[in-house]
Amino acid sequence: METTSQIQVKDQLLHVAASPHVTTGETMQRMMFDVLIALIPSIVVSGVVFGLQAILLIAVCVCATVGAEAVFQKLRKQPITVSDGSAMITGVLLAFNLPATYPLWKAAIGGVFAIVIAKQFFGGLGRNFVNPALAGRAFLMSAWAKDFSQTPYPFGAVPAGVDSVTAATPLSGGPVPALWDMFVGNMPGMLGEVSALAILIGAAYLLWRGVIRLRIPCGMIGSFIVFTSVFGMINGTFSPANIPTEVLSGGLMLGAFFMATDYATTPMTGRGQLIFAIGAGFLTALIRHFGTLPEGVSYAILLMNVATPLIDKYVKNQPFGGVSR
């Protein structure tokens, strides 16, 4: 005969809570602020390289995204969620995809578009199907493409008595700086993409905090290297010496670590994320070599964002204990 204590133990074992069964102290707000902390090195470098106008552009974009989210949710009589930090991240990333000389009022419109159209119209955080910052950049690129054609020289490289000097980026046919200058950020370009060193410092923090994994960044960059080499052989421009320049130019590093890793717009499974990353690298190389645009990272990630539901539909993990057909 079972004792009372044995019956009590069995009763406790039968009371199973709904999944997930393993919980942590991590919250969405904490993860968002981890991303903001990881973006600080790139913010500092953009201010050092491009001066006060870079910091002003970031501030305007953040104010536009945070304000747009608060006003939209207020008008819709929804809880105001700007304290979660996601709108701030969208503002910073949008500014990172713009040149320092970009008109502030246009940048603000891009911030409103990113939040209202690309995020809130689809239900808010976690329900948007494309990266809001990249959607805002694509909108601005479509509306005012000329503003992206010239980017300012680094602040210290401007001659005395001259306010600013603009030039084409290396991908747009401009002069190609030394690899070290490209690595630390001493070259013309968009705010957040010029310094691979700052991006890697921020990425290392996110990896340490467990916010991102290397699967998507490494898959995207590795895929890009493979396909840009293949396409270079096809059009006769391939040279092994050009690979580091291709990787350090444009928004490949920024996109791979900070935008392609967005939870809401990437596949749920590891295999799906690898497919996503390979596709993004392939499309980036394809656009750079055969498209009319010098840079393809933004559109590559957006196209793969759209393909994410299809990837999730056909690439699924087998349930534990299940039998495959």
Image (cartoon, helix red, strand yellow):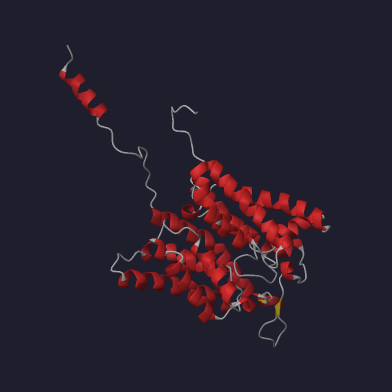
In the image, residue 312 lies at what x, y percent? 49, 45
Along the line of sight, the residue nearer the viewer: 100 or 209: 100
Please state if 220 lies on the left or on the right of 34 as rendered. right
Q: Position of residue 119 (x, y in %)?
A: 43, 64
Whether residue 273 is situated above or below residue 8 in the rendered picture: below
Q: Residue at x 35, y 64 (%)?
A: 81
Occupied quadrant, residue 253: bottom right
Res 223 visible? yes
Where is residue 202? Give x, y as percent: 56, 57
156 with respect to 298 (left or right): right
Determine the residue located farthest toward the front in the rendered image. Answer: 325
Name the residue at the top extreme: 1
Q: Residue furthest bottom?
A: 161
Q: Is residue 300 above or below residue 105?
A: above
Quarter residue 1 falls in: top left
Say which residue appears at 54% left-offset and 58% top-offset: 259
